[in-house]
Amino acid sequence: MKSYLHILLLALTATCLLTGCFDNNPNPPDPEGKKVLYFSYSALIKHLDPAKAYNSGFYRIMTSIYEPPFEFHYLKHPAELVPRTAADIPEPVRYDSEGNVLSTDASANQVAKVVFTIRIRPGISFQDHACFARTESGEFKWHLGPGESFPSVSHPDELLQDLSITRRTRNLEAADFVYQFKRLANPMRECPVRQVFESVVLGMKDFRVEIENEIDRIRAERRRLAGAGYNQERDEQENPIWIDYDKFDLPGVQVVDDLTYTITVNQDFPQLLYWMTMPFFSPIPREAVRFYFQHAAAERNFTLDRHPVGTGPYTLTENRPNYRLVLDRNPNFREELYPAEGSPGDMEAGLLDSAGKPMPFVDRAVYLLDREAPPRWNKFLQGYYDIIELEPADNDLSGQVMELTIEGQTGVTADMQKRGVALKVSQRPFIRYYAFNMRDPVVGGLDEKRRKLRQAISIALDIEQYIQIFENGRGKPADGLLPDGIFGHGEGKEAINSVVYRWDETLGRPVRRSIEEAKKLMIEAGYPGGRDAEGNQLVLNYDLRQGRGVKTQRDWMNKQLGRIGIKLETRTTDANRWLAKLEKGNFQFIYYGWYADYPDPENFMFLLYGPNGKVDHHGENYANYQNAEYDKRFLQMKNIPDSPERSAIIKEMLDIAREDAPWIFAWQPTSYALHHSWLKNYKPKFISEDLLKYLDINAEERQRLTGEWNRPVTWPVTVTLVLLLIAVVPATVQVVFRQRKEAAK
């Protein structure tokens, strides 16, 4: 009998648990009274050191921790530069070779140097961190001596629990910005922007050479002391080389006083202030670098890459890249108010409801790794992610929530409208392109025949069809290097790429040239019907990175180029091998893209500047294109202010590039993001990934709606219980009856 009662008890317990307590929410309950946001990411966040991180995925974390001098206004479009840690936007002072101040209308060839004086806001503090920890005597608690180790801790924050610590932070100083500038020059650190700034910042190249010499000296000394068995790689892994940058002078970046520093460049460089919205130029305290370059830190795998130190609104309290990252509100963050102005329509959209209120609004942001699209989508639809940005891999799933409206615009489905899901569409400064290797003997070169071959391929590749098939119509064909919203892009008939399009007066828009025109160009290129003089079919190599959708895109490309007789051989490799091919120029044809660092035409036009070639100069000119006329105009255009003169030069450069066709100017992606009704103040930024501090959330609404959407299905459990009762109760009654009958005898 006991066994039957046990079964009955277990069934009742299971029913209670499954019907009353089951919850499929992957997120833990929010702390009492705290606002928590939930996001996903699909690729590992590897670097958080601002001297080397150069990826939009990394920036989404970094921009909430680090604060460069300037930022772009959250709501205004076109992009407007505003101070962040700086007190104001500096006016550059231009000097001639004699040291005389030049007038604002002086020509660029008179400029010998330009000085930017940057003043820092007083009263800004770094986050609490063990690198700043001092005892009552003023000594650093965790700057240890040789052979000393940290206690058994998993995060630097745990070291702050020591009761002897009386100071945990300090105020921001101008010297912290100068220190970071010097870090960019360190050759041991692969800084992706070093080459740009060595060419313009006064003395930066010489400074780098001095650092190289210091590294060589330290290595030689270590080798001498260790003897013949010295292992440099192991030694530097356990005891990283720390450079005392204060011993070396960088003339182009100087401290003036505690809250002022100057940057001196050797030419007009108006883009400098745009550059200084990026994490590269955030302040880094020397205490943090000294802390992380200890043997004790290396033992615990504590690095600036994993545990950043900044002045921003949030601190990184958990960093498990293969699982999740957690940002918590920085209690030391100063008062910063939500913008009181925006763009047309922002007020009606509720984006100014928080005007004048102190930021940040949420207490915690949790980023969870979800590599695959289906689980990411399902969690969003369940309400477990607050926002989701559509990626190309999401195309097959987006139909669940998006559809075309009667007006031909994309909107959310009726079901999603009932749930309060909102769609935000934005055109960001991003361009996709196919690049020919201009060093290749078949598709490269500036002679007339190979130019016509590239033009024919540009016409044959139907980008409009590509956008419809592979991007669900999300994007628009590109007419040159410049995307919409960038000065010099142009409008209407004057802006079209006349090599690939003709203007249709009846339709009032450009129309792709016919395949017959492409075939005619193939004949002029020496490939009638896609065959050379010996009758051999033209075969081109197309190098692709491995990924989803590669086969269907390859088949589409083959079909497109097959119309003009070209056969495409697709060579698919992993990302590292693919990048190695680009470095060596070992390709004919690739697909790539560029997202603007800052909203200036120079940041796109430099992608075809000859001295920026990938193979010879390790730049971003992956086509290795070089045209003397284009290069000449680039130097004229790059550092002059926006004006009719600049616009005219840009038009000439675009015409040269369109005629030479080193790229097939493919398309400008349109960004789509979905968010739930409880998320407030969300607006995609034209430039930058700095969003978190502006966002707010109605936590009560989220809890209520996710509860309604995710009620457990209990009927299978109830049916199972009934069946158990039908089976167990009669048997139990029979046993009891038999026992009583035997007892009565």
Image: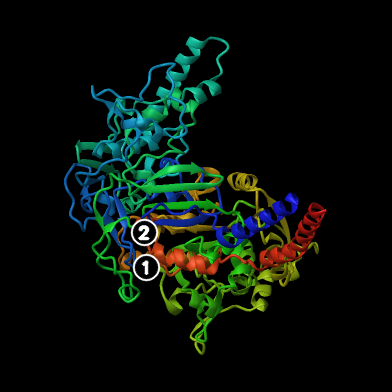
Along the viewing direction, whichever of 250 and 534 lies nearer the viewer:
250
Q: Which mark is residue 704?
A: none
Question: What residue is shown with label 2?
Answer: 637
Along the viewing direction, whichever of 443 and 177 lies nearer the viewer:
177
Position of 312 compared to 528: left or right? left
Q: Is 132 situated above or below 702?
A: above
**Residue drawn 32% across and 24% down?**
141
Q: Residues within 10 Å of mark 2 (few under 14, many from 20)?
A: many
Question: What residue is shown with label 1?
Answer: 648
Label 2 to label 1: alpha-carbon separation: 9 Å
Position of 222 compared to 74: left or right? right
Q: Amino acid at mark 1?
A: Ala
Q: Is 59 situated above or below 662?
A: above
**Residue drawn 42% across and 36% down?**
304
Residue contact between numbered discs 2 and 1, judged by CB atoms under 8 Å: no
Q: Earlier in the sequence, mark 2 or mark 1?
A: 2
Rendering coords of residue 167 (x, y %): 26, 31
Q: Amino acid at mark 2?
A: Met
Rendering coords of residue 607 (x, y %): 48, 55
> Which quadrant of the figure has residue 467?
bottom right
**Disc 2 secondary structure class:** helix
